[in-house]
Amino acid sequence: MENKFKDILVIGLGIFGYETAKQLAVEKLNVIVVDKNIKKVSMIKDFVSEALVADASSEEVLKELSVDKYDVVIVGIGSSNFESLIMCITYLKNLKAQKIIAKANNEIQKEILSKIGADEVILPEKEVATKLARHIVKPNIVDFFYLANDSTIATIKIPGKFINKTLKEIDLRNKYNINAVMIIRNNKSMMIKNPDLKFLDGDEIVVMGEEDAIKKIF
């Protein structure tokens, strides 16, 4: 499915904003970044479509940027400067930004930013901690993505017991009600169409099913 997001504005080049902007640029999106720190802007300018030195907590600056033309505005202003973060999101909302994603440091900040207009608020440290704990407990599970219908999409490292076995032999669908939809081999992804495909050491598979079932079998 083609990504509907094409034009992204990233405000603030802390670690969160910087790395997010670079990853989006790698995915061939049109990424514009803004930060008042000229050194940070210089560091990223070769990776993104455009890098601007400006104070994005200023309403005039945001007006000049025409923030309503972007599919997503990501606000990575440091939460230690919470007043500027609040001002930025308030101005973005007033200027009809289509989708605002912001970073917060704690649940209170998250609640405030949501109330003043952020469409989505990320707690990076909490999410990283959750992933780390999950990785320690279930090292074969690379990542989880939760769907609205209580199903889960997970990326799994092939465990030793499945190496050199086929999907037909493992029989995930009938035994565990888990569907294997994609295989990642040598950093290349492909849909699983042949049930006789043999899994190799180092393979990863993308599966869909209930979280408890996925954790149990993997």
Image: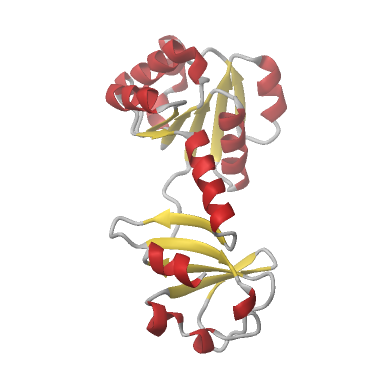
Q: Quadrant of the N terminus?
A: bottom left
Q: Position of residue 28 (x, y in %)?
A: 58, 47
Q: Give the residue at the far front of this rendering.
A: 137
Q: Is residue 97 above or below residue 163?
A: above
On screen, residue 90 above or below 181: above
Please state the horizontal and vertical placement of residue 32, each as a whole percent of the image. 55, 30
Quick one: 214 or 193, which is closer to the camera? 214
Judged left or right of residue 214, residue 119 is left
The total of numbered circles placed on residues is: 0
Task: Place residue 209 in its image quadrant.
Answer: bottom left
| Residue that appears at 64% across and 80% down | 163
What residue is drawn where x is 47% and y is 74%? 180
Position of residue 182 relative to residue 198, above or below, is above
Q: Position of residue 76 (x, y in %)?
A: 51, 26
Q: How is the image coloured?
A: secondary structure
Residue 96 visible, this angle: no
| Residue at x 35%, y 57% (from the top left corner) | 147
Q: Is residue 195 left or right of residue 90?
A: right
Identify the residue at horizontal 64%, vertical 66% (top origin): 188
- Quarter of the view holding residue 120: top left
**Looking at the picture, how far across and down is residue 9, in whole percent?**
49, 30
Visible residue check, residue 114? yes
Q: Toward which corner of the image does residue 16 lie, by quadrant? A: top right
In this picture, residue 22 sits left or right of residue 10: right
